[in-house]
Amino acid sequence: MRARHPEAALCVTGDLNMNVGGRHFYSTAQARSLLGEAMAGAGLFCATGADRLPDGALRHPPIDHVLLPLAWQSHATVAATWEGGASPGPRLSDHSGLAVSIDLPAPPAPEKAPPMPRTASIPG
């Protein structure tokens, strides 16, 4: 995919079935290590790891994650969380939910083309 679209930013989201950081660990140490190696090899970071969640946001670290380009690390924040499972109101999932906000600077404006040179007409 990167060879075909080298200018595109790779973003991966989904149920990785393991937490990234935090005091509770879901999955195996080997699986978490392999995930870390794969993220590093792909130039990604986990925007939803336990260390990036607001204090007290969730009872347990999430197992669903958003992986973003390393260059976006200082531009991404967890904007909202909600507990999965039994809660008042409609149940969306047994997994906790996460919303990530990405605030990237605007790309530079394209440069204006230089004015066309005027040509002089030679009479006659």
Image (cartoon, grey):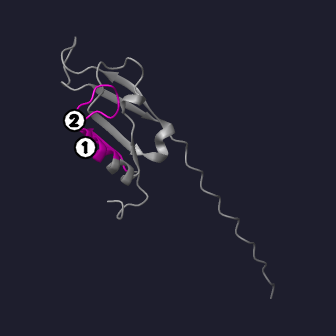
Q: Is residue 92 left or right of residue 1?
A: left
Three-letter code, disc 2:
Ser
Neighbours of disc 2 within 10 Å: few (<14), some (14-19), many (20+): some
Looking at the rendered structure, the secondary structure element under dot 1 is helix
On whether residue 123 falls in the magenta region, the answer is: no
Q: Is residue 27 left or right of residue 78?
A: left
Image spot of residue 49 (x, y percent): 36, 33
Which quarter of the figure has residue 115? Answer: bottom right
109 or 26, which lies in front?
A: 26
Image spot of residue 57 (x, y percent): 36, 19
Which quarter of the figure has residue 12? Answer: top left
Q: Which residue is mark 2?
A: 27
User: Residue reaching furthest bottom?
Assistant: 124
82 or 26, which lies in front?
A: 26
114 or 124, which lies in front?
A: 114
Q: Tell me, yes or no, if residue 103 can be seen here.
A: no
Q: Residue at x 31, y 36 (%)?
A: 65
Neighbours of disc 1 within 10 Å: few (<14), some (14-19), many (20+): few
Q: Which residue is mark 1?
A: 30
Q: Is residue 48 left or right of residue 105?
A: left
User: Residue reaching furthest right?
Assistant: 123
18 or 64, which lies in front?
A: 18
**Residue range highlighted in magenta:** 10-36
Quadrant, the N terminus: bottom left
Image spot of residue 45 (x, y percent): 40, 43
Relative height, residue 2 to residue 25 (above, below): below
Q: Tell me, yes or no, if residue 11 can be seen here.
A: yes
Q: Residue at x 81, y 85 (%)?
A: 123
